[in-house]
Amino acid sequence: MVLILVSWCVMAAFFGVWGTAVSKWLSLSSPSGGVFFLGMMTQTLVLTIVVFFAPLNGMVFLANALLTGVVAYTVRDELQKNGRELWHSFQNFSRFDKVLLGLATLSALWKSAQLPFLIDNDTYYLQTIKWLHEHGLVKGLANLNVAFGQTSPWQILQAGFDLPFTGWPLNDLNGFTFVAFAFILLGLTHKVSIRYALLFSALLLQFVSAPSPDLPVILILLLAFFAYPDRPSGWWAILVVYAIFLKITALPFALLLVVALVRRTLPLRFVVRIATPFVFLWIAKNVWLSGYPFFPSTWVAFDFDWTVSEPVAASLGDMIRNHEFMGEAGFRSFGWLDRLDRWWRMDGLDRLFNIGMLALFLLALVVKGKDRSFRLLWTVCVLHFGFIVVVSPQYRFFLPEFVFMGTLVAADLVARLHFPKSLQATFLVGALVLPFVLPLALGNRPLTGNGKMALNDSYAPRLLLWPSPTTRLPDLTFESERVGNLRYYTPPKDAYFHTTGDGPLPCTNRRILDRNARKYGVVPQLRTPKLGDGFRSLPADEWDKTN
């Protein structure tokens, strides 16, 4: 936890400087603490550009630090002003708000120090970040493992700040983001009700220990929703664009920008100015990794030697669409009514969130339906929810509207029932303390059926100083195998189909290559003898020769 706190201080310095600079350059106003999110956004853009040309190693970190120093000097007056405003904002916190911020910080530190909870961390997060550290963006990387083509700009930002050259790489960016989010909520004293978003801390903190883009997208969109009534400000618009850049599942929220342009509450020039670099870099990243500008969609493809075979690329989209149905026989033949019927009859956490989301939509409309700006926001949230149910009905994708509607309903319930302040305080403190006691009461097993992913190190004393490894599978062994001109590393045959863990580069899973060879007739090969030059796909004859 101590090491992570030091890392957060480094991030705060970088993001504070760049956020201040962007605020000045765009003449943008944001709430106290908003500069950290603007800084994250700017650093994401900068590092995404850099990673096309260089790996995100210690030299790049040093160069970034020097550049940040130069930027800090050019905006030194504004930086001092922002620093004073942040300190003044914190001083104006009530004693109770300081307690809440302290608990939010401790909870995020504690969860960040634990073993990663999300299974995606050991299927592709770790490997994509490792490639970014050692080689940068690699042409055709999705040929080696189609999941690697999903590399999010959020993982690029994490790769730029997890300090692997120290010998102890960290996955702590999400924890810092949660604390910055809590600071902003508590600082908005004219919108006290939005602090009830912290009631969902136990849920949100499940995403803290891995570099998942899900958490920043949830938090960024929540800040955008809370700021949306103040539509003349461009703050919310920038947040929406950034969220879409991090995770394309947020795309329907671009409708808010369209409406703002139609109503002329945002100037077209401003929207084009902020959206253009994000759109260009997102398309360039996809083309570089897979050959498809809208990957994982195969709608358009470029004829490059590294372009992934269309059936292999389409298999990822198929897996995403059918993620919740793959355990059922004949799932690919399901029509829309079949999918909706099975979605409605899901059990466990899926059913809880699915039904809960529908209930919250109705309750929130009753509570806030008279507010015109809310009705528009509600409509866009419903459209996004429908988009998710149709495209990939995973509840984590509609958590932004779930937490938002839940916050509004909770605030209204407190007001209508005249909850005493002591009871409100109990709920908020309890929500931030719950992550500490939940593992003791339940462990992780009720939340996952995977035994390896249920390992629990929540109360290890070493966490106070040293965080856990960035993988839940530190003892996983890897075997070296060859297909054609490619020598790669793979976990044992009894490992989970998609597992790649923290294996040495180039690493994939032999079972994935076997599937691609047998089913799609292709195998990955090096484009040149140099690993960093990337991969292409060739007919599976090479597989037959070597297996």
Image: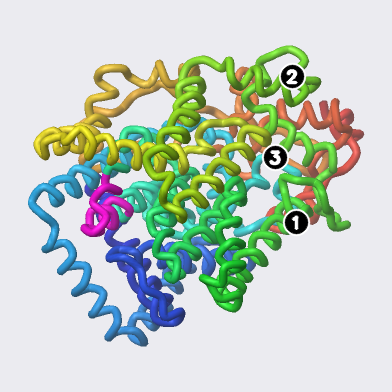
Helix, strand or loop for disc 3: loop
Is label 3 or label 1 in front?
A: 1
Q: Are marks 3 and 1 in contact (CB under 8 Å)?
A: no
Give the left or right position of residue 547, taking residue 41 as reference.
Answer: right
Q: Position of residue 191 (x, y in %)?
A: 27, 55
Q: CA distance from mark 3 to mark 1?
A: 17 Å
Sequence-wise, the earlier of marks 1 and 2 is: 1
Q: Earlier in the sequence, mark 2 or mark 3?
A: 3
Magenta segment boundaries in residue numbering: 181-195
The residue singled out by tag 1 in the image is 293
The residue closer to the viewer here, 49 or 272, is: 272
Give the mark toward the camera: 1 or 2: 2
- Viewer can see residue 134: no
Work out whether mark 3 precedes mark 1 in sequence or the reverse, and give the earlier one.
3
Q: Which quadrant is the N terminus positioned in?
A: top left
Tell me if 268 is positioned left or right of 303 in this view.
left
Alpha-carbon distance for marks 1 and 2? 28 Å
- Give 514 or 409, whichever is nearer the viewer: 409
Residue 497 sits above or below residue 470 on the image: above
> Can you identify the residue that label 2 sits on?
331
- Give the x, y percent position of residue 224: 43, 56
Residue at image coords 59%, 61%: 259
Kind of residue at badge 3: Asn
Residues packed near mark 1 inside 10 Å, few (<14), some (14 to 19) or many (20 plus): many
The amino acid beneath tag 1 is Pro
Relative to residue 143, is residue 293 depicted above or below? below
Q: Which residue is mark 3?
A: 145
Q: What secondary structure characterizes most of the magenta part?
A: helix
Q: Tag 1's secondary structure?
A: loop
